[in-house]
Image: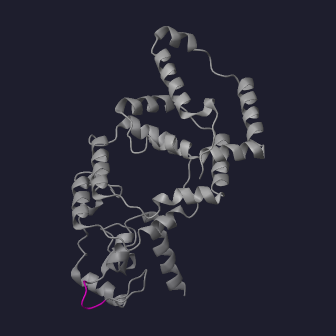
Amino acid sequence: MGKIKMSKHNSIEERERKSAVTKKLWQNPEYRLKQSIPKHNKVSKKLISDASKKRWSTKKYILKMKDIFNSDEYNKKNNRNKGKRLTVQQRKNKSENMMGRIVSQKTREKISKAHKLIWQDEDYRNRRKYNTGMKHSKKTKQILSNFTKNQFKDGVSEETKKKISVALKGKRKPKGFSEKLRRANLGKKHSEVTKKRISINLIGKTKGEKNGNWNGGSSYEPYGKLWTNLLKKTIRERERYVCFICRKKQDKSQRDFDVHHIDYNKKNNDPLNLITLCHSCHTGTNHKRKKWIKYFKDSNLKIQNG
């Protein structure tokens, strides 16, 4: 693309010169004090917004700006900071400037609409394809990993947890999000190293009262006197070695099916309160116990009446 003539006001040299002068001025405390004027009111904001919309509504202005953005001089200026990282102080200043700013729903809709409009331009889509298919190198992955570890080495503070909770309150996952996530992770397995890490992290965190399935220590309660191997064998034979839920038949080469208490009372060993479940289904009945009690009782009534 040929070089486009730019006015002195728009030239890179002129902008750099003005930037240097402005920085020098802002180092003076008196100048900063004079510049601490109040923010634009609603009227002035509307006037500025209307003027900008009027400019961008003309085809001539859009073509002019498009030519400038595609020019070699403009790209050279934009690429001079490519690969450079912000200093710690610059990142801190940027963070402080954005802190407390809440983007309204109306503004979000405007941003979304603008993005959709930009992506309709084929030239823009082609320019954005340079990252497609690229993967992080091992060195970059290690840098990102170390950064995350250092950031959360002391865990997430209660204050941060509270902020996250407030930010996510009332928000729902988009329709189909869980299904997409499930499909993306389908067939993936954790490595032995990852399994070991998860195991170490969970030590003491999911034990006893800290576990979501804690039921007051009922698993440590003793069974009644009638609970014997003979009783369990009788129930399995009565059910013809079939799981009450999935109707799968017990395989002789595998472990015996479990005998389950319908009301979850370990001392109530009445045969009418006992059913046969495979190990997988028996594990599932540890959650939502009220639902399962109702399901088993209703199913038994249907069998008796049927």
What residue is at 39 percent from the left and 79 percent from the top? Answer: 272
Residue 254 magenta-drawn?
yes
Position of residue 104 measured from the top left corner of the image (x, y, whole percent): 63, 38
The quadrant holding residue 55 is top right
- Whether 67 is drawn above or below 133: the answer is above
Q: Which is nearer the eye, 89 or 70?
A: 70
Q: Please state if 227 lies on the left or on the right of 90 as rendered.
A: left
In the image, residue 202 sits, relative to residue 105, either above or below, namely below
Work out whether residue 122 or residue 196 is closer to the camera in this orientation and state it: 122
Is residue 292 at least partly visible in the picture?
no
Above/below status of 157 relative to 114: above
Q: Residue at 31% of width from left, 41% of height from top? A: 151
Q: Quadrant of the rendered structure where residue 51 is?
A: top right
Q: Is residue 80 left or right of residue 145?
A: right
Give how far across and how far down residue 45 sits, in percent.
70, 27
| Position of residue 119 measured from the top left corner of the image (x, y, whole percent) | 63, 56
Residue 92 in which image quadrant:
top left
Q: In the rendered structure, which segment of residues is drawn in magenta?
A: 251-255
Q: How is the structure coloured here?
A: one colour
Question: Residue at horizontal 25%, vertical 53%?
Answer: 201
Q: Quadrant of the C terminus?
A: bottom right
Q: Could you tell me what secondary structure mostly forms the magenta stretch?
A: loop
- Can I make out residue 49 in this image? yes
Residue 185 placement (x, y as % from top left): 41, 68
- Who is closer to the viewer here, 256 or 34? 34
Q: Is residue 305 magenta?
A: no
